[in-house]
């Protein structure tokens, strides 16, 4: 479908239908989504409920946010390092080493 994701309410309804006995393959075909998507949602729900080991949805979101913040900080650090390099390369236009008064 080209979208980043489905709304949580939609996922919940799909999982409820699977729990009520609908076959994943039939449901996926009727809704126009991949059956693997539904299986992934079902597995994540089992993880969130503590039935299967793995990262919960909350932990996964926190990890993604932390990684995003690390990328931002690394980019800022690279900018500061480059600025420091440029300032260190800068020489006095008069050629002297004494600071002006």
Image: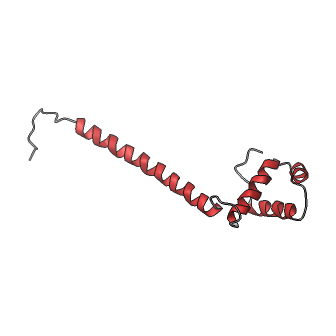
How many discs appear?
0
Left or right for 92, reference 33 = left
Taking depth in this image into account, of 82 and 42 the one nearest to the observer is 42
Residue occupying image coordinates x 72% and y 52%: 5
Q: In which quarter of the image is residue 12?
A: bottom right
Residue 95 location in percent, x, y? 12, 32
Q: Is residue 11 left or right of residue 52?
A: right
Rendered location of residue 19, percent (x, y) = 85, 64
Q: Where is residue 77 in the image (x, y as percent from the top left)?
A: 38, 47
Please give left or right for residue 85 compared with residue 57 in the image: left
> How far across and down, in percent of the image, does residue 9 sit?
77, 64
Colour scheme of the picture: secondary structure
Q: Is residue 40 above or below residue 58?
A: above
The one of 94 and 5 positioned closer to us in this rendering: 5
Q: Residue at x 59, y 61 (%)?
A: 59
Q: Residue furthest bottom?
A: 49
In this view, 98 is above or below 21: above
Q: Residue at x 91, y 59 (%)?
A: 22
- Indicate the quadrant containing the N terminus: top left, top right, bottom left or bottom right: top right
Question: Observer-nearest residue: 78 or 95?
Answer: 78
């Amino acid at each position: 479908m080209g979208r980043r994701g489905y709304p949580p309410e939609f996922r919940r309804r799909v999982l409820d239908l699977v729990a009520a006995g609908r076959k994943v393959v039939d449901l996926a075909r009727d809704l126009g989504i991949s059956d693997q998507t539904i299986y992934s949602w079902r597995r994540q729900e089992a993880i969130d409920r503590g039935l299967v080991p793995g990262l919960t949805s909350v932990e996964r979101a926190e990890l993604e946010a932390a990684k995003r913040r690390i990328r931002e900080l690394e980019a800022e650090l690279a900018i500061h390092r480059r600025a420091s390099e440029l300032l260190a390369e800068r020489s006095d236009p008069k050629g002297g080493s004494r600071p002006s008064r």
